[in-house]
Image: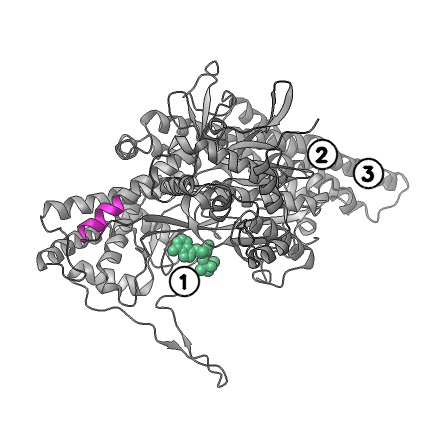
Amino acid sequence: MSVAVNERDTKMSNCARLSATKRVAALKAGAPCAAQEVTDIGYADDVFTRETMKTYLSKETYKKLLKTIDGGQPLDETIAGEVAHAMRHWAQDRGATHYTHWFLPLTGGTAEKHDAFLEIKDGQPVQAFSGKNLIVGEPDASSFPSGGIRSTFEARGYTAWDPTSPAFIKRHGNGATLCIPTAFCAYTGEALDRKTPLLRSMQVLSSAAKRLMKCFGKDEEKVAITLGPEQEYFLIDKNFYLARPDLVLTGRTLFGAPSAKHQQLEDHYFGSIKSRILNFMNEVEKELWTLGIPAKTRHNEVAPAQFELAPMFEELNLSCDHNMLVMEVLRQVADRNGLVCLLHEKPFAGINGSGKHNNWSVSYGDTNLLNPGNDPHQNAIFLTTLCAVIEAVDKHADLLRASVASAGNDHRLGANEAPPAVISIYLGDQLADVIAQLEKGAPKSSKHAGTMKIGVDTLPPLPKDATDRNRTSPFAFTGNKFEFRAPGSSASCAGPNVVLNTVVAEAMNRIADELEAAGVVGKVEPGKHTPAFHNALQKILQNIVKTHKRILFNGDGYKSDWLTEAAKRGLPNAATTPEALKAFTKKENVAVFEKAGVFSARELESRYEIAIEDYTTKVMIEGNCALDMARTMIAPVVKAEYRETMDAYVKAREGGIASGTTILHDDIVKLGAGLDAVKLRCSELEAGVAKRDPAAVIAAMTALRTNVDALEGMVADDKWPLPKYREMLFLY
Ligand code: ADP
Ligand code: MG
């Protein structure tokens, strides 16, 4: 039986089935089918891009769809049928047989349930995908975390098409699936995912920025919130990974003595990339480019076997979706190359962990509101945006900290390689100076950088940045954006950005309130604001600096005296996830989200519960895994070593041989003491797990690890049951 296709279908598919080069040739020859622009890297070939839409959609429908994508207007449901039809044809032309609503449930990962395009009509198989199938899906939601929002017997959950993130095709072995990015919510409309609050927060910040710009007399323009997430990760050989139950079950090593060489020589950072890794990176990038993900930068990171991938920035919602795909592609390509990509925040103790630097900015039309220009002291819009961020971050540092809290990130934050758990802002010399002037009155000058002499005659003087970098700050101004460095490597980007958008919107709205109340706003020619406007604005910004300057810190965030200083300034310092997450339960914080319409109280409460449960469960899995490994892998080899040494000792004594017996005796005592300690720690760990007490489990696990790592140095290398740090981190 053949699947029914109509004439239009055939034309379409013939056109799109042409190979890239042929399509370019066809394009040049003025072929009727406007093939999408193709370069030889196949960029966005698997994305239902605007170019593709133009090819597959009627002009009117394309225009209407753009109104939603760019103009933020509600989706015109009458076009859904045509869009679905076009999407299916395009996807089939590219080999897809199935479609799925792709969403971001509160598990932290992504979810997909595939359906074939197949339907049976009058006994005949036909390919179909309706507008309704595109707009809404109804997966059984009962097995996704909902934090009490939905009881298991009310299984309904809905996925709703997000037209602002384009559909794409995911390839898997011999097949391909059309993926439609969607929001996921309960029957009541409450959000069950990470995308819905993100979209809400973007809307909120967008309105606030528009309102503020109106105060400046600007015409309404599109607000774009931009994100460039730098992704850190580790790669190790799959054979090592498979021999480590801790890595397989928890993503991090629960045991492992330090390798003699680790990152002391600082020779890995930006080092030349080994060819096996470069091959991996090339394959990753090719896949990402096909998915329209602008992977740009790649390099070795600080720790051995640690790497980074940075895409170019994109609009926030898309960038968040893309980062989820980046993580998936990293894992899959690693697997195909006999490697494993570890995205955990701290896979190896004693060396750097992995983060996800969240480069965030807001633009209005073509203007990046965080671009200081040459003379930031005269750039009122920039200074206002900057002050809004300062106010927001100081007022809600606890929420930002909470937004990055996870079991994995607890091992990383403040571990002398990553920013501390105390949130502070780094502005750099130039802006710190402007802000200091602003505190006293109207800022009069901006420090300029000039050029830098290298001291080599043949090298030209280099233009200098106005400000040096600071790697130790959790929230650093980096030229034309803020870089939030606390997010963990495995987390979705959505959480921290929901908070950031919401709190910055709150501050922008407050500034707009004051300007409006002062009666100084209105439409003006560029640069023609009244003195009254300038005075009012200056007073507002001055107050912000005075009230919130404690959040500004330009020094070394890794030093312990900063923590003392931060405590004096009254900055919150939540060291653990349970402590940090409490911020989501504070009445005044709940009110911030409720007022903004980003989370209802119930949604926030459910998220708090899910995060706490996730934390506790992960710690318990680690505890049980450590117990199991200590009892069934470590203790037996130590016992064998003990037995063997004892045999040798007894035999030597029986044979009347004295030499060697002192050391044998010592070893027996040490191994025995180690075994005793392991036994004791295991009992403590077991008790902690039985009580489901994360703090007790972590303490017992840490103590057990110390004992086990010491034993690693006493047992014959060929008998040790686990791949060692020096192997995992250097043999790849
Ligand atoms: P680093 O030197 O810290 O690695 P880069 O200058 O390479 O930083 O940029 C890091 C990330 O910041 C990149 O993803 C880049 O696209 C992104 N970025 C640049 N400008 C913006 C912006 N206006 N908004 C958001 N992200 C941006
Ligand atoms: Mg960076």
| Residue 673 image point, x, y percent | 67, 37
Q: Residue furthest top?
A: 153
Ligand 2: does it lie within 8 Å of the C-beta at label 2?
no
Give the vertical position of 160 relative to 244 (above or below). above
| Residue 399 image point, x, y percent | 34, 39
Name which quarter of the figure residue 471 lies in.
bottom left
Give the vertical position of 394 relative to 455 (above or below). above
The chief SS type of the magenta part is helix
Q: Residue furthest right?
A: 655
Ligand 1: does it lie within 8 Å of the C-beta at label 1?
yes
Judge from the rendering whether residue 442 lies leftward or rightward of residue 197; answer left or right: left
Crowd class of label 2 (few under 14; some 14 to 19; many from 20; radius 10 Å): some
Q: Tell me the element at label 1.
A: loop
**Residue 609 in view of the camera:** yes
- Identify residue type, mark 3: Glu
- Identify residue type, mark 1: Arg
Question: Label 3: which residue?
Answer: 644
The CA distance from mark 2 to mark 1 is 46 Å
Name which quarter of the figure residue 650 lies in.
top right
Question: Label 2: which residue?
Answer: 633
Question: Label 1: which residue?
Answer: 469
The magenta-colored residue range is: 208-220
Q: Residue at x 32, y 28 (%)?
A: 600
Q: Which mark lies nearer to you, 3 or 2?
A: 2
Judge from the rendering whether residue 650 lies leftward or rightward of residue 33; answer left or right: right
- Identify residue type, mark 2: Met
